[in-house]
Amino acid sequence: MNRAEGSSAAGGVTGLGHEVYQLDTRMAGHDKITASYLIRAGRPCLVETGTAPSAPVIKDALAGLGIGSQDLATVVVTHIHLDHAGGVGDIAAMFPAAEIVVHERGARHLADPGRLMASARRVYGDALDTLFGEMRPVAADRIRAVGEEGSIDLGGGRRLSSHYSPGHAKHHVGLVDSASSDLYVGDAAGVFIQETRDLRPATPPPDFDLATALGSLRMFAALAPSRLLFSHYGPVTAVTETLERSAAELNLWVEETRRARDARLDLDHAVAMVAERTRGRYRAVAPGGDPELAARTETVSSTEASVAGILHWLGKEPVAGSAGPPG
């Protein structure tokens, strides 16, 4: 893969050309876990907010780029998971003129995040506060829901088109910039680790579906973007290679997890099997590597969460050699 491009980062802000800026959200106090992106066009647009504790970080980064509280026209989230949209209520309050754009299947959760937060609390427990914080509601009249496709006016004839891309989540969209041909992939193409060029699947429960995810990757390829801008983390210009590799990683993880499921092994054993099968594939988590990088990689791309999502999906199909799903 090509190296990530752009000017050197200052204060977590990296210029990527075409008036696009990558903003490090400093999720949970770490570098390079989740990126937001500013398109500093005639109608400035923020793609992804990061978590709730990241909102002040984003506000400061935008101020440094000349975007004041009344200047931001639009905030778009690729999906409503808390590392992508957890700060949307705080950002909406900080930038009261901004319209909030989300897929129609996620809109109600931005207006009333109670159910989403309760579910996250059950999964993460007390760690929720450190990792994601509390999503604040957005006034319903400020939310614009998009369907299969949508368009966001960036001013001067420039636009951001949204394309429904489920498989990772049922409320996921990819976004294409008409001026730069950048494609904001959210989590639909997995997690990219800049330091090692690793690409790992992102398949948490409950929405993962292999066929749907692979269909979204094919749709991304058909859009013929110039770059992929990963929310985790950064730009990649080897578009075809990266999308093909994303599909290959999905298939590999599903194959190994299916083997564990067909042997009626539990989650811990399935995780161990996937880890062993992929031991040589990801330098970020290789034995003897940088333990800090390995820990950060697992924070943003948990093997257990991804295997659990695949097992959840596999639960809908029969176990090999049986007439129905496991009892």
Image (cartoon, grey):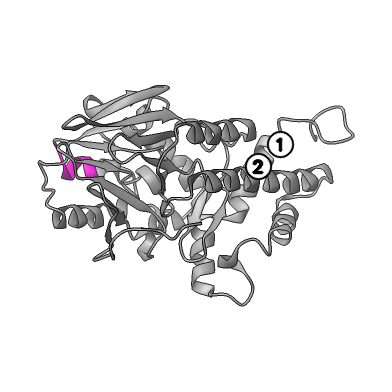
CB atoms of marks 1 and 2 within 8 Å = yes
> Looking at the image, which residue is at 47% across and 45% down?
120
Q: Quadrant of residue 57?
A: bottom left
What amino acid is found at the position of numbered circle 2 in the picture?
Ile
Provide residue 121's location: percent of width, then percent of height.
46, 47
Q: Secondary structure at mark 1?
A: helix
Q: Nearer the viewer, residue 79 or 249?
A: 249
Q: Quadrant of residue 158?
A: top left
Q: Quickly name the residue at label 2.
A: 310
Residue 269 falls left or right of residue 19: right
What amino acid is found at the position of numbered circle 1 in the picture?
Leu
Q: Which residues are magenta?
A: 91-96
Q: Quickly name the residue at label 1.
A: 314
Provide residue 136's location: percent of width, then percent of height.
29, 41
Residue 93 among those drawn in magenta: yes
Can you say whether 98 is above or below 34 in the image?
Answer: above
Residue 53 among those drawn in magenta: no
Provide residue 216's location: percent of width, then percent of height.
53, 33
Q: Secondary structure at mark 2?
A: helix
Q: Nearer the viewer, residue 253 or 321?
A: 253
Is any atom of residue 102 visible in this view?
A: no
Provide residue 186's location: percent of width, then percent of height.
43, 43
> Looking at the image, which residue is at 40% across and 38% down?
80
> Looking at the image, which residue is at 21% across and 56% down?
61
Principal SS element in the magenta part? helix
Is any atom of residue 147 visible in this view?
A: yes
